[in-house]
Image: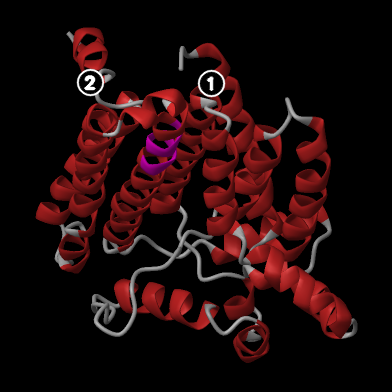
Amino acid sequence: MIKSLLARASLVSAFPRGWLIVLGILALDLVLGAASWFRAPLRELSKCVHWPLFYLYLRLMLLWLPALWPALKKHSLWPERFLLGLEAFALFICTTTVATCCIYLLASFRMPFADTLLSGADALLGFHWPDALRLLESHPAWMPPLKAAYGSILWQAALIILFFSLQGKRNELAETYLQLTLTLCMASALFFFLPALGPASLHGLEDALFRLHPGMKAVISDLRLLHAGESPDFAKRGMTGIVSFPSFHTAASLIYAYSYRRQLWAALPMAGFNLVMLASIPVFGNHYLTDMLGGAALAALAIWLCRKVSI
């Protein structure tokens, strides 16, 4: 039945499995919202409606346009590639919205913070976060490129959509989407059991972190409010990424670099850039080294699983 449904959906969508995943996460959001005291994220789900409708509208328009403007028949690949990129972008926005809602709802169940456990694991690995902070503060020239690399997680996704849609490479887009989404789902499940404020809070260095990366103040504030049974104020700002363990930034940087593997001219610079992103994650992302190892393991698992699944 599912295969038949996907076959029919593929007539109007390049990514029917992706939309099925969105519906699954949306259903989970509604279940979690019914079980939780915290309902505010559910109001954010309305943002998901506009993008699929906008895509369908443009798809219908571009299907009829060549009949009205015969010259476009000579360039039939252009609207198809445009629609491929537009749908991928719509799918990315919708997935990000429903997944972020899910993470906030999971945090509302107020599981004990796991900072002591994660810090202990770092100690066994010989990593001390305050030392990394002091190293960065002693080299201020490193800060701008590291901060820019850390903040690239969203525009790198947009670049991948543009890069592959212009080439008409639907399979590469679907593969990268599935890898990122599987990683995000697994990271969210682990976050439920092991939420954490991060090493800056554990070591009393939040002010130093906020000077380097002011955006982390909202992350830590939201986690504290949810753990105290209070609702963050989404009227002033939207939801943000609050997962500490495992590090989704780490997983995304590895998957981004992996996605370009078949085109060497793009793979080498993007691999180099994502190495800089990896170097930025402990301090700018307020992450334990254990978080990064967990994120890397999830990325490897997602890549392996996607190689076993027909895209």
Question: Could you tell me which secondary element the residue under label 1 belongs to?
Answer: helix
Q: Amino acid at mark 2?
A: Ala
Of callouts 2 and 1, which one flags the residue occurring earlier in the amino acid sequence?
A: 2
Residue 196 in percent (x, y) is at 50, 65
The residue that disc 2 covers is 9
The residue lying at 45 percent from left, 46 percent from top is 190
The residue lying at 73 percent from left, 65 percent from top is 280
Q: CA distance from mark 2 to mark 1?
A: 23 Å
The residue that disc 1 covers is 305
Q: Nearer the viewer, residue 267 or 116?
A: 267
* Pointers 2 and 1 in contact (C-beta within 8 Å): no
Within 10 Å of disc 1 (Cα), the crowding (few <14, some 14-19, many 20+) is: few
Q: Nearer the viewer, residue 57 or 20?
A: 57
Within 10 Å of disc 2 (Cα), the crowding (few <14, some 14-19, many 20+) is: some
Q: What is the magenta range?
A: 81-86
Which numbered disc covers residue 67?
Answer: none
Residue 216 in percent (x, y) is at 54, 77
Q: Is residue 10 above or below residue 44?
A: above
The residue lying at 29 percent from left, 29 percent from top is 66
Q: Which of the 4 image quadrants contains residue 288?
A: bottom right
* Residue 247 in view: no
Q: Amino acid at mark 1?
A: Leu
> Is residue 171 located in the magenta-colored stretch of the structure?
no
Q: Which of the 4 image quadrants contains residue 23?
A: top left
Q: Nearer the viewer, mark 2 or mark 1?
A: 2
Side of 7 where 131 appears, left or right? right
